[in-house]
Image (cartoon, coloured by chain):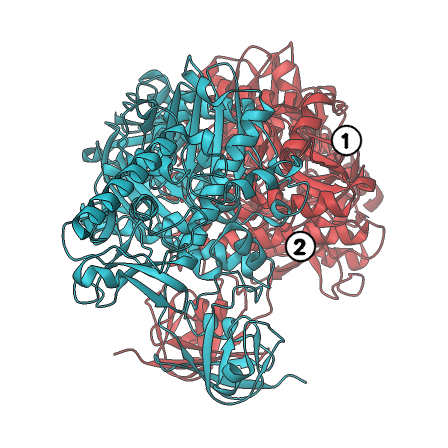
Chain colours: A cyan, B red
Amino acid sequence: MDSHCTVTFLPSDRQTVVRTGTLLHDAAWQAGIEADIPCGGQGRCGRCLVRIEKGQVRRRPNAHLTDGQVALGWALSCQTEVRGDVTVFLLPETVTEKVVVSGTATIEGPRSVRPPGDPVISQYPLDLSPPDLQDSAADLERLRRALATGPGVRDLQVDLSVARGLGRALREQKWRATAVVEHPSRGRSARLVAVRPANAVGASLGAAVDIGTTTVSVVLVDLQSGRIIDTATSFNRQVSCGEDVISRIIYSLRGDGLRRLQRLVRETINNLIGELCARHELEARQIDHVVVAGNTSMEHLFLGLDPRSIREEPYAPLATSFPTVSASEVGLRVNPEASVYCTPAVAAYVGGDITAGILSSGLDEWDGLALFMDVGTNGELVVGNSDWQVACACSAGPAFEGAGVRCGMRAITGAVEDVTINYQTLAPTLGVIGGGAPAGICGSGMIATLGEMFVTGILDKAGRINTAIERGQGNDRRRIVATDHGPAYVLAWASESGTKEDILLTEVDIGNLIRAKAAIYAGLTVMLRALDIDLKDIETVLIGGAFGQHINVEKSILIGLLPDLPWDRFRFLGNTAALGAYQVLVSRQARRQVEEIAGKVTYLELVADNSFMNEFTSALFLPHTDLEAFASVKEVLAQVSRNDAQAAAAEERKGR
Amino acid sequence: MDSHCTVTFLPSDRQTVVRTGTLLHDAAWQAGIEADIPCGGQGRCGRCLVRIEKGQVRRRPNAHLTDGQVALGWALSCQTEVRGDVTVFLLPETVTEKVVVSGTATIEGPRSVRPPGDPVISQYPLDLSPPDLQDSAADLERLRRALATGPGVRDLQVDLSVARGLGRALREQKWRATAVVEHPSRGRSARLVAVRPANAVGASLGAAVDIGTTTVSVVLVDLQSGRIIDTATSFNRQVSCGEDVISRIIYSLRGDGLRRLQRLVRETINNLIGELCARHELEARQIDHVVVAGNTSMEHLFLGLDPRSIREEPYAPLATSFPTVSASEVGLRVNPEASVYCTPAVAAYVGGDITAGILSSGLDEWDGLALFMDVGTNGELVVGNSDWQVACACSAGPAFEGAGVRCGMRAITGAVEDVTINYQTLAPTLGVIGGGAPAGICGSGMIATLGEMFVTGILDKAGRINTAIERGQGNDRRRIVATDHGPAYVLAWASESGTKEDILLTEVDIGNLIRAKAAIYAGLTVMLRALDIDLKDIETVLIGGAFGQHINVEKSILIGLLPDLPWDRFRFLGNTAALGAYQVLVSRQARRQVEEIAGKVTYLELVADNSFMNEFTSALFLPHTDLEAFASVKEVLAQVSRNDAQAAAAEERKGR
């Protein structure tokens, strides 16, 4: 016997009827509310708190809730079953911020974009002779003939839905039209993707999509010229079903979890495309080709492929090269016949974002030894040159992208992106994107804050805030405060901030950031040792990833995120995945190249290396337990120490 | 303002609510009743009669209804709008007979079927090594690797739905499985169409489909061995929306007519496939490849392509080569990834059934001059040899297939397939398929009846029945009867027939048959003249089409359906379209060949030839106005005349 209950969600007052036993999270989803479950529904993070206002529920046993909390009605939405009519209060959502930023900046790197000399999509104006009794060839054959004799396009594959509209289109346009043709690639023939009115030349668009675990970017391109029209970025709506890849995979195993995740990323992309097209008064149906780059899990979820084996040893994913699909198959609201190509992955944790990144960074064409780093929710490292490449992945977590950090945010208007702290006064000077009031801290701001806190002695090498520090002047003396997440340093007071709350960095935040940087550095150390490469032999460090454009080398080395190499060896390339996807979008040569890269890169499994955990533990310090590996930092600390001693001496002299 | 009415259909008592103004035919469709409209809804044939029992309708002006009929409630369902709540009585349906015949006979011709040396579909047993940390290649890549190193299948295209099930399939089957691969054809790469359990070898099936205007045949094939498992045939359910191609095209122009027609033929095919699979305890999902042959209009309707330009001068169809689609795209209930290939057409009225027919007849490999004839609802003629082929089409109509003939039926159990009539007594001797009581007359039976009536003098050369004939004995004297379709000859009395009604051939039936044979013969005459070929130079006549296996050469020449050539020049090949589709199903070489044929055949447009109507008129006699062209018939008639004279003389002697 099934019984049903009504669940009412506050403050929105939305209602839904569910079967008894349904989880509150699923009930919310059914009511059209994307309530966050950051760990994917494992009951592990304890962050999907809701308050039961009325009615009966069953809480599965969970260590995150104290008896006192339960008495006050608190429950975890992923661990609580509906047992009768229930009213539930949802906390304000934290990660559903849906900001769209724009401009081509995020994919401008130092490398020039290849000219589209070998386009994927071409447009051909046609002026056909109308049929008569002497030449009554079929419409489609007439078009084939014109494409074969004119531009030399042969063996044209025509999809059914394009064929269906052909007769009417040609007759209405009096046998003049523009044929949009996708050129053949490996294992596929040329395809007719659209027949447009004759005056539509110039209107074939493309979209390069970077699906990050945390953020998604879409680059809108004029395929005729290869020109980038605009770029838009937003949070990946899947974040509500898990903050990291593992949580998403766990979520995908629930009932229709996989379909939900697919829908969420599809909606994220469709919204970005809609936004871009609306802004430029273009039709999304003019988008005739889409290239997607993402990590292996993101590409699986986008295509609706089961990702479960990605988190199970031996980490063999379902696919690393992906079926090319039509837009209609995956629900993208563009030309339904547009083919959607996912860049190939190397392994479970080195995905199509990395092959696209290698392509756009040019690592595969580098003469000297180079290191490519992509720091996103995961950190991937590739070492190599034009002959060989070896890649590994380290689970950094999304801290540098603003998740798991109380005042974290992405690098958009209002984000603190640079910080200097006065050694004497402890007063910070903030660089805020857009120049207005600060609203939060983005990745580069976190690195800068951490570095400054460290060199000014606010933070010790173990990541603990020195609450007994005696420097500071006036109000700034009080910048070290106590919070429920331990001591914190206040970058901006509530009165100065755009959110009307203190902008601060807590010890818990700092712990997350240190773990993230330690994972990356440990991966680098293990990989270089496995390859018997000395760090100093690396001639160039190519930095990609979502925040790979703004970070400060000096401060990154200071905290041990980047290795201690001369600053001029670092090159910041911006969003290399989006840039690579763009290149594959406009050039068949680039597509072949990214496939060659995927076939050539050797994957190094860090889990198989026993030394990784030791290296990780050693890296959980600022900059590292082995200060000899960070000679430049040692020098800075020594200088600070001398300054400190001089200042103390001066103070002492003054005091006498 | 929209108002709605309830329409009740008797005798089934089904009800539906429609908008005021809806045609009765559309209301019936909405109620799930396929009421026949033989002319496609033009109001031209007057045969979709229904009786209004109650309620208000508006009859569009139509010459087919007399005032008296209207007063009695009669109406045409395609020309009558609902104006209020209405009760309608539907006459028993005439063409929805849904008989499935079986056995491989219909596609056994004198030509041996090519061995499948170059298969379209192969099955490869796989025994993959499970992934481990040393080799964590993705499932799909593991499969690709095995197919590349084993059978040498490279650049494998994998469709999304196959990829989706791959991980689970391989793991559940412990890395042993059977990969079903479609080999590359022009412009397409090898495709993975299924991954089946390891013990499923031998289970890949194929279906060759012949879509005739009147009948549809499906040949079920074991793709491993190329063996034909079984064949099934039924009426094309589209017949309810128009008996001939032109009526169907007109029907397709109504509202969702095109979608309805597509659905009807899809259902016809799915039913046949279901029937075949059920009988042999096979799964329709094991059907991994489908080849469809049909005339140009049938192929358009099957794919949902707009056929309207096929009936408009200059008769340029939308397509003559068709997109290869997946079964799921066209709604066939087989493996959704099975590709569905339609054999290419030559022109609007020389379709994929003819190119398949040329292929299976071997005309394109013939050394001497040959004539290929396909007599179905249309009659198509091809003259040529291995160097060249010229084709034309003549609108014969469906009379020889049993439609438009009162007691017509297909060549199934109970059909009269052969007739001899005793000159003296006028008594017929019937050959009945299956040997039981006769239920109707099939094409070969009509030819035989016509020929026998002609030589026995029951029928004159203009197709009129001699009601004043004085021969006949006993009961058989009364075999010439009067009907509402003019005089008729009774082949079987109601008491002897399986239908409990007289089996007879009326003058109206005879007129239809003569017009059909005249169209074919006129087409042949015009084509040979255009090519400057003497009939006598045709060394071989290859006869295909739905009834091309059973007809009697002598009697066909007698009525002028076949040209007067020595009997040993005729070869009866059976259903050449189905046989050709079968060849294309099992052999890529055959597919290439049918495409070459389509590219090579020259189409001769009879409409462009002024002499066609004259030739047609001349052929509206038995055997023809020009008896010199039928020397053998002239000889027979002379012999009959002599016998007649002798008999009369004998009678006279007796009487003395």
Same chain shared by disc 1 and disc 2: yes
**For this view, does B430 lie left or right of residue B58?**
right
Give A210 or B594, whichever is nearer the viewer: A210
Image quadrant holding the C terminus of chain B, namely top right
Q: Position of residue A360 (x, y in %)?
A: 37, 27
- Is residue B16 visible to us here? yes
Residue A517 image label: none
Residue B584 sits in which quadrant?
top right
**Dot 1 lies on which element?**
loop
Q: Specify the amino acid type for callout 2.
A: Asn
Provide the residue designation for mark 1.
B226
Q: Position of residue B496 (x, y in %)?
A: 81, 61
- Is residue B38 visible to us here? no
Q: Which residue: 58% across, 57% down?
A: A250
Provide the residue designation for mark 2.
B271
Q: Position of residue A146 (x, y in %)?
A: 33, 22
Q: Which residue: 31% across, 29% down?
A: A131
Q: Is residue A60 above or below residue A485?
A: below
Distance CA(mark 1)–CA(mark 2): 23 Å
